[in-house]
Image (cartoon, grey):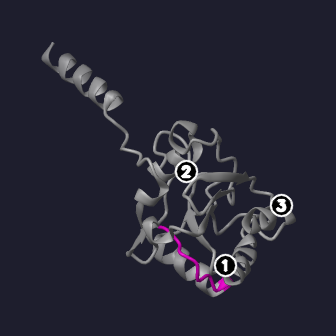
Amino acid sequence: MATHLLLLFNFLFFFSAPKGDVPKSIYDFKVAALDGSTIDFSKYKGKKILIVNTASECGNTPQYADLEKMYAKYKNKLVIVGFPANDFGAQEPGSNTEIAAFCKKNYSVTFPMAAKITVKGDDKAPIYQWLTEKKHNGFKDSDVKWNFQKYLINEKGELMAIFEHRTKPMSDEVIAAIEK
């Protein structure tokens, strides 16, 4: 009997425990970077922010090249933050160290790269809860459908656009939103 009660208690506690607080503003987020440092989003006030979930073994992986070109071109008004995730087809199996080495060697990535996270499901990182849930972002609900989906945040910290994974970073649609 005592064992059954203990199992029931553990079950109820696990499923009712909070998943983690979601900050109200994008500027309240501080996330671990690939190199072990911290990415503090409050440093990006006044700039647009493009957040992209990335993967090293995906058909969309060559988008890293265009993301790097975009970062170089718009550095004064845009920051790009990559979030490696292994949520789709196990296409990001590497460690943070391996991901950093891959990005540097193959695409000379200089924009901030966060540590590997989860972008969907029960373990979704708080920043992706903010990005995908209207109750947090004030813009709209969305689902991350695949690697390299893009979320654009304006200079005031408001989510303003979501671009599907097939939308190339240097597409007219993305560039127009950045230059807006």
At x 70%, y 74%, the residue is 67
Q: Is residue 95 left or right of residue 149?
A: left
For the residues labelled 1 and 2, the Cα–Cα distance comes to 22 Å
Q: Is any part of residue 88 visible from this angle?
A: no
Measured in 3D between alpha carbons, the distance from the residue under mark 1 to the one under mark 3, in whole angstroms, is 16 Å
**Residue 38, position as x, y percentages in the image:** 39, 71
Q: Where, quadrant-wise, is the C terminus in this rendering?
A: bottom right
Q: Which residue is mark 3?
A: 173
Which residue type does callout 2 highlight?
Answer: Val
Q: Is residue 108 above or below residue 77?
A: below
Q: What residue did someone put label 2 on?
A: 119
The front one of 149 and 45 is 45
Secondary element under disc 1, as helix, strand or loop, is helix
Residue at left offset 43%, top offset 47%: 24
Q: Earlier in the sequence, mark 1 or mark 2?
A: 1
Q: Quadrant of residue 141?
A: top right
Q: As rendered, which of 30 and 12 lies closer to the eye?
A: 30
- The amino acid type of the residue labelled 1 equals Tyr
Left or right: 173 as drawn, with respect to 5? right
- Could you tell which of marks 3 and 2 lies nearer the N-terminus? 2
Q: Disc 3 residue type?
A: Glu
Segment colored magenta: 106-114
Q: Secondary structure at mark 3?
A: helix
Q: Position of residue 51 (x, y in %)?
A: 60, 62
Measured as percent of width and height from the top left, residue 128 is found at 53, 50
Disc 1 target residue: 71
